[in-house]
Image (cartoon, helix red, strand yellow):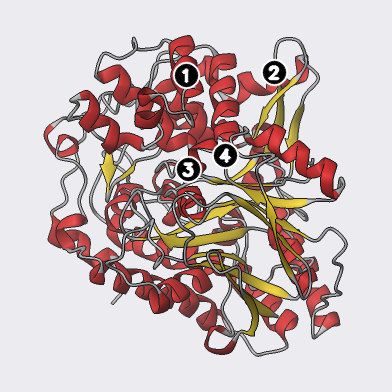
């Protein structure tokens, strides 16, 4: 396996052996490379920043749920290191070109035209992108399908990424020929857009064989791994049945569903935007209640959501999206929320950041609370030169400054997701201390605090949650390094041999001894890289805290507050 380096200014490229990055993959690789090669004090949109797209250690294997892709860079949103994770087909295709990662370096002049980059096994071609520049992602992707065939696998930025908006995503081709999978958080699309890259296309004809070194051992471990995922109720029933939106009613019942910009822990219209309601609508309209976001997915928590006329509207309709565009902004119409989700995919914007930004517009009196149609109008301006679109496309803190709003639910510049940290303290500790900025996926304390998977830790109390978050942050980084879907953690946490089987898969795939200790060391060392980068970027322990209103306001219905000191939170970070 190799690394491909592409200079976006000179259009030179070179294929390299893994060298010092051997043994790494996914987030462990992106974070090591960014820590080693990017000046921590550089501007995120400067030529000194690099963007890395990497498959995991198990990329290209036949292990279930091993097809996630990691995108890493210095974040325009947080000013720190960032890994953004996505499904799609990209990670599985990379090994067929004998590639583990692609590194985009340097930066063309400001007035340089956008380019598409076509990558084959031993060649990189730079192509004029003018035919799709300015286009929304779905029609742009359709043009790529027409040009390269229906087996095309691409990564592309939307109009917001072209304008380097801080909410910008990179959209990846999904198994259904749609650009519906997002590396959403942290503004990775802005970094690729700054390098004047509109789309990256992997040669559809590349088909290099990539087999495990120890085939029989791999087959045995894969069989057990599949059994583990199929035996757990969350990965075999809950997520396939209702998608991640199954959490709407669960988190609302727990009093932890942030409502009206984190003022309340319960939403009166939660049932109307719940996974159960969505599944009912999908079935009535001829959609699909379950589908995988990448090749080899057993969990199948994505879906196809159709509009009232039975026409495809959106997919990947996640809990966090429904919360951000629904409960938190008081929007009640599920079709409005689905339309907002589709617009985010079209323009190339993170639904969590943009959903929170809509609430800031409501706080500032720009549009009324709960007005879905007005929110749709705002998002349609994004990616254009309209000043309001430019404001919304740059996220919560930017919009807060523009609209004179001080209630900004962010940590390290990134807006918080769909769990109030006062009622789910395990994930609150993660928000505060992860190098990623406010990010639930970096250490999903909801498992122990609410779902009681892998343990039972009271989410209303401080005790045990710092240790819980730390352990989850390490395990999550390890899972990201393998290229596994984070949702496998539900089954692994409740399985005696889950971690061991993951280690066995790596050992059999690579032919090198790999233990559970090695698996955890991947996560520890990944976090050390990220913390080291952020320290050089100027972050201190004072940045490991949540906005003040979480400490001064009690959250109904349980009337809990955020009560950790900065020093108490330091124990959640690896040494």
Crowd around label 3: few <14 · some 14–19 · many ≥20 (10 Å): many
Whole-percent x, y for residue 236 in the image:
71, 46
Whole-percent x, y for residue 429 in the image:
29, 53
Give the residue pinned by disc 1.
270
Tell me if label 3 and label 1 are in contact, CB under 8 Å.
no
The numbered dot on residue 158 is: 4
- Look at the image and tell me whether residue 357 can be seen: yes
Location of residue 129 with respect to 324 vertically, above or below = below
Q: Secondary structure at mark 2?
A: helix
Crowd around label 2: few <14 · some 14–19 · many ≥20 (10 Å): few
Alpha carbon of mark 3 to alpha carbon of mark 1: how far?
28 Å
**Left or right relative to 96: residue 181:** left
Q: Quadrant of the N terminus?
A: bottom right
Give the residue pinned by disc 3.
168
- Mark 4 vs mark 2: which is more N-terminal? 4
- Mark 3 vs mark 4: which is more N-terminal? 4
User: Which mark's residue is nearer the viewer, 2 or 3?
Assistant: 3
- Mark 1 vs mark 2: which is more N-terminal? 1
């Amino acid at each position: 396996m190799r690394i491909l380096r592409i200079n976006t200014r000179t259009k030179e490229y070179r294929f390299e052996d893994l060298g010092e990055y051997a043994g790494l993959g996914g987030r462990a690789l992106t974070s090591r490379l960014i820590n080693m090669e990017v000046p921590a004090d550089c501007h995120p949109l400067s030529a000194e920043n690099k963007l890395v797209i990497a498959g995991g250690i198990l990329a290209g294997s036949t292990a279930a749920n091993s097809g996630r892709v990691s995108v890493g860079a210095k974040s325009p949103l947080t000013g720190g290191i960032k890994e953004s994770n996505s499904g799609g087909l990209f990670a599985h295709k990379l090994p067929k070109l004998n590639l583990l990662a692609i590194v985009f370096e340097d930066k063309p002049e400001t007035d340089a035209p956008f380019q598409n980059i076509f990558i084959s096994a031993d060649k990189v071609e730079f192509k004029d992108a003018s035919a799709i520049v300015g286009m929304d992602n779905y029609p742009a992707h359709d043009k790529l399908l027409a040009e390269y065939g229906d087996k095309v696998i691409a990564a592309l930025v939307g109009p917001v990424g072209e304008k380097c908006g801080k909410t910008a995503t990179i959209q990846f081709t999904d198994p259904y020929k749609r650009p519906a999978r997002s590396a959403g958080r942290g503004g990775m699309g802005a970094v690729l857009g700054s390098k004047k890259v509109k789309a990256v296309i992997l040669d559809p004809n590349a088909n290099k064989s990539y087999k495990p070194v120890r085939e029989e051992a791999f087959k045995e471990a894969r069989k057990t791994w599949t059994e583990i995922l199929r035996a757990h109720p969350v990965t075999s029933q809950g997520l396939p049945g209702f998608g991640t939106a199954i959490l709407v009613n669960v988190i609302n019942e727990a009093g932890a569903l942030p409502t009206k910009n984190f003022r309340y822990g319960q939403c009166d219209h939660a049932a109307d935007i719940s996974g159960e309601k969505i599944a009912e609508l999908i079935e009535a309209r001829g959609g699909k209640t379950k589908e995988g976001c990448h090749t080899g997915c057993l969990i199948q928590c994505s879906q196809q959501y159709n509009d009232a006329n039975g026409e495809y509207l959106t997919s990947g309709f996640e809990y966090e999206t429904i919360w951000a565009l629904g409960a938190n902004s008081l929007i009640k119409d599920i079709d409005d929320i689905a339309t907002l989700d589709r617009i985010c995919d079209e323009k190339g914007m993170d639904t969590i950041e943009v959903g929170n930004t809509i609430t800031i517009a409501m706080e500032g009196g720009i549009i009324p609370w709960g007005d879905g149609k007005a929110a749709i109008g705002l998002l349609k301006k994004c990616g254009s030169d309209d000043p309001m679109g430019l404001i919304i496309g740059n996220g919560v803190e930017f919009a807060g400054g523009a609209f004179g709003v001080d209630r900004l639910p962010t940590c390290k510049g990134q807006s918080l997701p769909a769990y109030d940290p006062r009622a789910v303290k395990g994930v609150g500790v993660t928000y505060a201390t992860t190098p990623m900025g406010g990010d639930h996926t970096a250490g999903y304390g909801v498992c122990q605090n609410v779902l009681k998977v892998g343990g039972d830790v009271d989410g209303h109390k401080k005790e045990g949650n710092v240790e819980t978050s730390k352990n989850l942050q390490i395990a999550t980084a390890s899972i990201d390094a393998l290229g596994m879907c984070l949702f496998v953690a539900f089954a692994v946490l409740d399985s005696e041999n889950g971690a061991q089987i993951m280690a066995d898969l790596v050992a059999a795939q690579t032919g090198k001894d790999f233990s559970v200790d090695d698996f955890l060391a991947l996560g520890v060392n990944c976090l050390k890289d990220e913390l080291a980068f952020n320290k050089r970027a100027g972050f201190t322990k004072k940045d490991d805290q949540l906005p003040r209103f979480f400490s001064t306001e009690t959250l109904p219905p349980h009337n809990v507050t955020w009560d950790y000191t900065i020093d108490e939170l330091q124990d959640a970070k690896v040494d």
